[in-house]
Image (cartoon, rainbow, N blue to C red):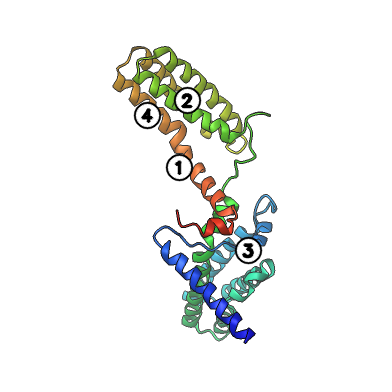
């Protein structure tokens, strides 16, 4: 009897979970997160980005084998399949949790077909191995890259008292303060907000340079500086339309272009990294 109660309870739990997902099917995106142990193969825990380099090597090795199978070049086939065999098995050593996902049958078929000089079978086995790779990439590549390769701005600071996040919020307000002020014909307030925005952009540039060391990616760059000058002049002498166009250009150059890369990936990283409580998962008021 006890076992029957246990089975009934488990079935009820499963049905409840199915019901929750069904109710939220138009609001929920289901993603698979990789095991946390994969972090040891990504920065900052790993300086060489070993996981990425292993993936790159496997892609190159599979292409080389296909090239030499088509030209029936046995010497190079044997060289590259040896490399493939070593690096493919390394996945299981780095991530024991994924050992059962390895397509060892296809790898063995590739080796056997090369020895027997069945070149069409080599290519067929490679295609099967590629399907296995793509299956795993479909499940984990996007989430893994977002969690472990997207930049983390949460701990960055402009100075000892101002975090990067709060600084960005202040700059966003300054952009809108400029718009509100010139829309209401408050020239002095618009110019004051622009001056504060210019200072904020220069302070932000001192953080950006830590990663963007190339002078071509400096912030603010010459185009942004010229656009700020144009905006300042339009606030003094231009029409409302000219002022709006100048501010819009600055917002695109100084805000939107960077946000298109950094804010999207950072927000996704936070979303995927944060652990949800049962209360949050069971909410119906999405």
Counting residues from the start of the chain, the first of labels 4 and 1 encountered is 4
- Which residue lies under the disc numbered 3? 35
Please say if 67 is above or below 31: below
Q: Is residue 159 left or right of residue 68?
A: right
Q: Residues within 10 Å of mark 1 (few under 14, many from 20)?
A: few
Residue denoted by label 4: 248
Residue 99: where, in percent of width, then height? 64, 73
Residue designated by label 1: 260
Q: Are marks 2 and 1 in contact (CB under 8 Å)?
A: no
The CA span between labels 2 and 1 is 20 Å
Residue bearing the label numbered 2? 174
Label 3 vs 1, first from the N-terminus: 3
Nearer mark to the viewer, of 2 and 1: 2
Residue 239 position (above or below residue 210): above
Q: SS for tag 1?
A: loop
Q: Is residue 139 visible?
A: yes
Say which label, 2 or 4, has the lower sequence index: 2
Q: Residue at x 44, y 36 (%)?
A: 256
Who comes first in sequence, dot 3 or dot 2? 3
Front one among 230 and 50: 230
* Label 3 vs label 1, nearer the camera: 3
Label 3 to label 1: alpha-carbon separation: 28 Å
Which percent across, then down, holds residue 117? 53, 84
Dot 2 or dot 1, earlier in sequence: 2
- For disc 4, the neighbor class at 10 Å (few under 14, some 14 to 19, many from 20) is some
Across and down, in percent, residue 233 comes to 38, 15
Give the CA separation, mark 4 to mark 3.
Answer: 43 Å
């Amino acid at each position: 009897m006890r076992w029957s109660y246990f089975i009934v309870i488990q079935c009820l739990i499963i049905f409840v979970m199915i019901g929750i997902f069904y109710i939220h099917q138009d609001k929920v995106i289901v993603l698979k997160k990789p095991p946390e142990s994969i972090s040891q193969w990504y920065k900052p825990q790993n300086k060489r980005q070993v996981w990425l380099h292993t993936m790159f090597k496997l892609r190159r090795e599979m292409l080389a084998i296909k090239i030499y199978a088509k030209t029936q070049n046995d010497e190079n086939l044997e060289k590259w399949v040896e490399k493939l065999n070593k690096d493919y098995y390394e996945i299981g050593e780095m991530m024991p949790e994924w050992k059962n996902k390895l397509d060892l049958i296809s790898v063995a078929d590739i080796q056997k077909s090369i020895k027997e000089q069945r070149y069409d079978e080599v290519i067929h086995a490679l295609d099967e191995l590629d399907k296995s790779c793509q299956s795993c990439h479909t499940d984990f590549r996007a989430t893994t890259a977002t969690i472990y390769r997207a930049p983390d701005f949460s701990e960055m600071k402009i100075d000892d008292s101002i975090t990067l996040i709060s600084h960005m919020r202040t700059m966003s307000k300054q952009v809108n303060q400029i718009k509100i002020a010139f829309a209401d014909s408050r020239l002095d307030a618009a110019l004051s907000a622009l001056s504060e925005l210019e200072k904020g952009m220069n302070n932000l540039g001192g953080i950006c340079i830590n990663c963007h060391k190339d002078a071509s990616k400096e912030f603010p760059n010459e185009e942004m500086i010229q656009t700020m000058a144009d905006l300042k002049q339009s606030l003094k002498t231009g029409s409302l339309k000219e002022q709006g166009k100048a501010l819009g250009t600055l917002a695109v150059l100084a805000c939107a272009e960077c946000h298109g890369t950094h804010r999207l990936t950072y927000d996704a990283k936070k979303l995927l990294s944060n652990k949800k409580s049962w209360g949050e998962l069971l909410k119906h008021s999405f």
